Amino acid sequence: MKGTIKNFLKRKNVNITVQAYLIDALGAMAFGLFSSLLIGTIFATLGQQTGVELFNVIADYAKSATGAALGIAIAHALKAPQLVLFSAATVGIAGNALGGPVGALAATVIASELGKIVSKETRLDIIITPGVTIISGVLAAQLAGPGIGRFMTWFGNIVKTATDMQPFLMGILVSALIGIALTLPISSAAICIALTLDGLAGGAATAGCCAQMIGFAVMSYRENKIGGLLAQGLGTSMLQMGNIVLNPRIWIPPTLASMITGPVATVIFKMENIHTASGMGTCGLVGPIGVFTAMEKGSRMWLGILLVCFVLPALLTLLFGEILRKLGWIKPGDLKLDL
């Protein structure tokens, strides 16, 4: 019986694993968020600064599609068939409305897996599959969403309050942890958005993400040249995960840099960010754009963006990287990417 169920789930491509739900699905949330809420935030900033109404219109439409984009992205990561994939748009809307991005994640995972189980099992597939997907997803959103939303808000408020009270220590902690999350195959952007990590905590998160992206970009320049610089500095430091698995010590320089730039951001520059941008780092320059949106305009803001997001991560990571190279902890080729 156990073997029969296992074979059935395997045939339906239902993989109940941490990899599927907390890495693949959570990582896919970043694409859904970037394709809706994050790009909408960028257009909203452009609209505010240029006065071009079209940018504001685009921003409103993009932000309104957040739930649907999340649902489709998560279902796609779970390799859902077409009817389940398209039905996940409705589930994502319900989950996001009732429980935020994490609510959308929970509801879509449940709906996608149940939808996959019934997919193409009856002659009424065109009705049964979307029906089961949407009903199960909306019910999951209604049952779990509000509780998930309240918990994420509560936890996020604790982090933000602690950062306001202890900007130095929390600057180190938040910067290092969110920066590490950015390089891991999960979504730092989704984490920050789920926790509504804005204000000083958002500034610390931005510092950590920038330290990882700019740090790896400049530290690996000798191996990857301009292509690697742009791919990591404006794309993602996640590209280095394969190399980190082979030699975890290459992660030390950018992480140490983040532990310095974090308190520099919170204590010296009082850097703030909006929660939709705080986990993005320099990816598409979303992090700096968010700082520009959140802070009062002036020389401190511009100097903070320049130093915390670009200059200090580059210099500190290069310094720590050279020390580790001389110690033999980092060898030629350890940071090479297949670009």
Image: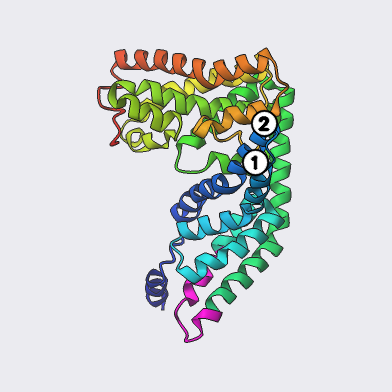
Residue 153 higher or lower than 90, as above or below: above
Q: Which residues are magenta?
A: 110-127
> Percent x, y for residue 303?
61, 14
Q: Position of residue 252 (x, y in %)?
A: 42, 24
**Residue 19 in picture, x, y percent from top left:** 44, 52
Q: Is residue 115 magenta?
A: yes
- Where on the picture, by quarter, is residue 334? top left
Identify which amino acid the numbered label 1 is placed on. Answer: Phe
From the viewer's perspective, is 139 left or right of 245?
right
Give the mark count.
2
Q: What residue is rendered at 70% in x and 34% in y?
A: 51
241, 41: nearer the viewer: 41
Pointer 2 residue: 50
Residue 254 picture quarter: top left
Return the residue found at the far bottom.
123
Q: Quadrant of the C terminus?
A: top left
Answer with left or right where residue 112 lies relative to residue 164. left
Instruction: Give residue 119's position: percent from left, percent from top.
Output: 47, 76
Out of 247 and 333, give the one closest to the viewer.
333
**What residue do we see at 55% from left, 35% from top?**
280
Residue 205 at least partly seen? no
- Above or below, 30 against 326 in this view is below
Query: Mainly helix, strand or loop, the magenta region?
Result: helix
* Mark 2 residue crowding within 10 angstroms, few (<14) / some (14–19) / many (20+): few
In the picture, residue 230 is in which quadrant?
A: top left
Marks 2,1: beta carbons within 8 A: yes
| Secondary element at image label 1 | helix
Q: Pointer 1: what residue?
A: 55
Query: Is tag 2's residue or tag 1's residue first in the polypeptide sequence?
Result: 2
Q: Is residue 81 magenta?
A: no
